[in-house]
Image (cartoon, helix red, strand yellow):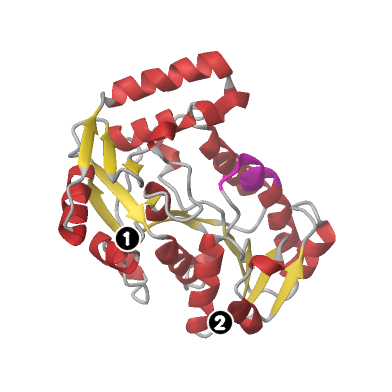
Amino acid sequence: MLILIAGVTGNIGFHAAQHALAVGHQVRGLGRSPDKLDRSLRKQLESFVDSSSYFDIAALDRAVHGADAVICAYGGLPELHLDAQLLLFRAAERAGVKRYLAAGWNYDWRKIQFESEPIYDSIRMFHSQVSITSQIKPIHIFSGILVDVFFNRGGDKGFLPKDCGVWDPRKKSMEIWGTGKEKWFFTTEEDAGKYGVEVVTSADAEKGGFVSVCSFSNSLEEIKAIYEKVRSVTVTVNRNGTADDLYRLSAEGKNKDGRPGFWNWHRYEFHANCVSGVWNLEDLQNDNFPRVKATSLEEYLKTNPDI
């Protein structure tokens, strides 16, 4: 298949392109900064379409022309998940594309209340809009939290303790809310890209729907133990409050900053949902995609010694 990857210069888009090429697909890239793309990878692309902005309609139309499938690997911003993605989706619609993987790779937002977590509202609104206005049925992947974000690896700095995250990469310590025994669901960016390709090229992709996959599921206490075993170090744990305490902090932030100021409080809501387990993944479908060998936490740590 010829797969268009929108956001191919991003982390998940890059890994999706690598896997698609490795298993014999053609890949076309779409993005604003072709220089950000690995040179060796760019040479293997069918083509790369430069886009001046997410509302560059002419570029979108060129990008989807002749494509068999589209993977939207836009970053996690509301304007990209809704405004930008709708424009890409409509271009795919005009081009007759039937296989469309929506931006996401997240927890199961169907289980939380609308407007409780603004980041997910945009994804839900996109899904709702296209479900009543288009014959294309998009696919959504639920995969928990990205491991790279959890550990603040590379440029992924959005889940530090100062942002109500867990892992402090400098101190090698953990901020634990709840008991620490609650299961979290994790997917590496590499596995996310691979699953994206396998899902959008699967036999049932044109039917759309929801797919739940992940690399591994561990409690924070298990993550501590595995890290200590692999690294032969001691991880310091700072115990905090409960999921209810996190929801309270989120509510206080909402009252203070409102929805426009969601960046100041939404991670409290995100963290609370992880501790409470309200949006946990169910009925994992990893076995449906045998070409993806899910990465364990041990394997991830051994291949990323910088963490």
* Main SS category, magenta section: helix
User: Looking at the image, can residue 62 be seen?
Assistant: yes
Q: Which mark is residue 215?
A: 1
Q: Which mark is residue 52?
A: none
Q: Is residue 43 left or right of residue 184?
A: right
Residue at x 31%, y 64% (from the top left corner):
300
Q: Is residue 47 left or right of residue 105?
A: right
Q: In the rendered picture of this protein, how many numbered marks are placed on residues?
A: 2
Residue type for callout 2: His
Q: What stretch of residues is rendered in magenta? A: 76-83
Whole-percent x, y for residue 182 in the image? 22, 39
The secondary structure type at the circle numbered 1 is loop
Q: Nearer the viewer, residue 133 or 242?
A: 242
Whole-percent x, y for residue 256 in the image? 54, 14
Q: Is residue 91 left or right of residue 119?
A: right
Q: Nearer the viewer, residue 212 or 231?
A: 231
Residue at x 34%, y 69% (from the top left corner):
288
User: Looking at the image, can residue 1 be seen?
Assistant: no
Whole-percent x, y for residue 116 in the image? 48, 27
- Label 2 sits on residue: 25
- Label 2 to label 1: alpha-carbon separation: 23 Å
Q: Nearer the viewer, residue 233 or 275?
A: 233
Q: Residues within 10 Å of mark 1 (few under 14, many from 20)?
A: many
The secondary structure type at the circle numbered 2 is loop
Whole-percent x, y for residue 180 in the image? 20, 37
Where is 116 relative to 171, above or below?
A: above
Residue at x 41%, y 29% (from the top left corner):
268
Q: Which quadrant holds the C terminus?
A: bottom left
Residue type for callout 1: Ser
Residue at x 58%, y 58% (from the top left corner):
73
